Amino acid sequence: MLIKEMTQAECNDFLSRASFGRLGCSLNDQPYVVPIYLAYEDGYVYALSTRGQKIEWMRKNPQVCVQIDEIAGDTQWVSLIATGRYQELPEPQYKDEHDHARKLLEKRHRWWRTAMAERQLKSDDQLIEPLIFRIHTESMTGLRASDETSDFEAKKS
């Protein structure tokens, strides 16, 4: 197995195709990681949520990360971590950004499902207010594993 670092262009391309990942946030030295549906464009990761622990924590500490995996097998996978800052997109203040984020997210299959299903499990309230947010990516790193063997490994055989 050969593991290579991805270039920034490869990271951007991979993240722009992704629709599901994990959001990591922390508060008072306690990490919290949750699954999210997402969309990426021009340096921003967009997502939908409902009010709850992750939103409360990100409001207090906007430094977050998003982790995306694509696993084809034990020796064929891609893993990316993007770090950045959380920003809510409330209307009417961010109407254009909010509408743009929604259009990007709507291209993803079941983009609303995780946030709404989780909130409905915890509440009898049928009026659940969705919240669209974005993460301004400050850095991205990625690794790609493949079945290819390096020259060194081939010479050992």
Image (cartoon, helix red, strand yellow):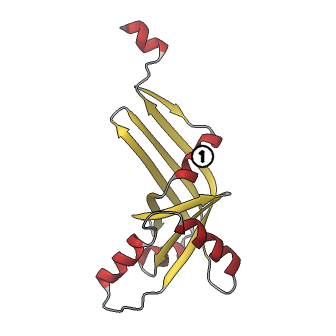
The residue under the point 47% across, 75% down is 49
Report which quarter residue 153 is drawn in: top left
Q: In this view, does 144 lie to the left or right of 140?
A: left
Q: Which residue is drawn at 54% across and 67% down?
A: 105
Q: Where residue 7 appears, x then y in whole percent? A: 62, 37
How many residues crowd around disc 1 within 10 Å: few (fewer than 14), some, or many (20 or more)?
A: few
Looking at the image, residue 62 lies above or below residue 146: below
The quadrant of the picture occupied by the N terminus is top left
Q: Which one is in front, 15 or 6? A: 15
Q: Can residue 86 be seen in this view?
A: no
Question: Residue at point 46% right, 51% down?
Answer: 68
Of residues 137 and 102, which is closer to you in this image? Answer: 102
Instruction: Tell me: residue 101, above or below residue 20.
Output: below
Q: Quadrant of the C terminus?
A: top left
The answer to whether residue 119 is above or below residue 74 is: below
- In this view, the residue in front, 35 or 112, is 112
Q: What residue type is labelled 1?
A: Asp
Q: In this view, does 75 lie to the left or right of 12?
A: left
Q: Examine the rendering and report whether any part of residue 84 can be seen.
A: yes
User: What percent of the width, then of the height, locates residue 54?
Assistant: 45, 73
Between 65 and 38, the residue placed more toward the observer is: 38
Residue on which disc 1 sits: 13
Q: Percent position (x, y) of residue 59?
A: 54, 76
Q: Is mark 1 on a helix, strand or loop?
A: helix
Q: In this view, does 55 lie above or below 14?
A: below
